[in-house]
Amino acid sequence: MKRLSTLVLLSGLAASAQALELQSNDLADGGTISAKHVFDQWGCEGQNISPHLSWSDIPEGTKSFVLTVYDPDAPTISGFWHWVAFNIPANVTELKQGAGAMDGQTMPVGSVQSKTDFNQVGYGGPCPPQGHGQHRYQFSIHAMKVEKIDFGPEINPALIGYQIYLNGIESATITATYHRD
């Protein structure tokens, strides 16, 4: 009976543990992305301002964070990377609106923004092909068990994805949508 009680107690502790959570003042999970955050080139007429993001309930052992924004609905065989930032220090829990500017001046010290599939560094907002339908944009924060990923801004986003696979502890995602008529 003692063994069963211990298992019940341990499972109760695991169930009460908080999971990493991602929030935004600008995005709602399942909501539509506003023009403020839409790309401002390639025929799109947004302002290309990265949204506010914050995270909480940081898992034990977190030494840094990686942020990714990915469109799995892009008409490519590999989707489309819209923003990748890594080596975000473990004590950072928020990126203010506009932090993803190409100059990187408002990113936390030590962070690296890599090139996106737009072939530029920093945030690139939604800009699906006209008439292609609704696309999902997955804004994800990944808690990492390493302090630093030893790459610079020229690194391919897929290699950062591999590092997340190797060194990730936990992830949280907000999925928002956008389409062009």
Image: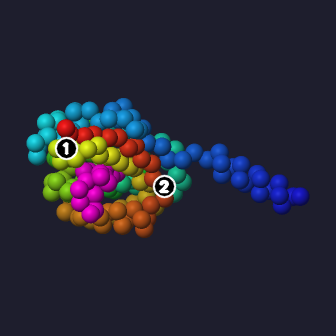
Q: Does 71 appear in magenta?
A: yes
Spot occupied by residue 6 in the image (x, y as percentages of width and height): 80, 56
Mark carried by residue 131: 1
Question: If the image is split into quadrants, where does the C terminus sit?
Answer: top left
User: Marks 1 and 2, how far apart in space?
Assistant: 35 Å
Q: Is residue 74 above or below residue 92?
A: below
Q: Quadrant of the N terminus?
A: bottom right
Mark 1 in CB contact with mark 2 (< 8 angstroms): no
Query: Residue 12 in the image: x percent, y percent?
Result: 71, 49
Given residues 54 and 68, the one toward you in this image is 68
Which residue type carries mark 2? Glu
Give the mark count: 2
Question: Residue 172: x, y in percent?
Answer: 45, 48
- The residue segment tinted magenta is 67-84
State whether residue 146 appears in this view. Answer: no
Task: Using a 10 Å C-alpha cutoff, classify the residue at mark 1 as few (fewer than 14 neighbours), some (14 to 19) or many (20 or more).
Answer: few
Q: Residue 53 falls in which quadrant of the image?
A: top left
- Locate residue 169, reporting x and y percent: 48, 59
Q: Residue at x 41, y 54 (%)?
A: 142
Q: As drawn, is 137 to the left or to the right of 102?
A: right
- The amino acid type of the residue labelled 1 equals Gly
Q: Judge depth for marks 1 and 2 and give the one in front.
A: 1
Is disc 2 placed on a helix, strand or loop? strand
Residue 5, disc = none
- Residue hosting label 2: 170
Quadrant position of residue 63: bottom left
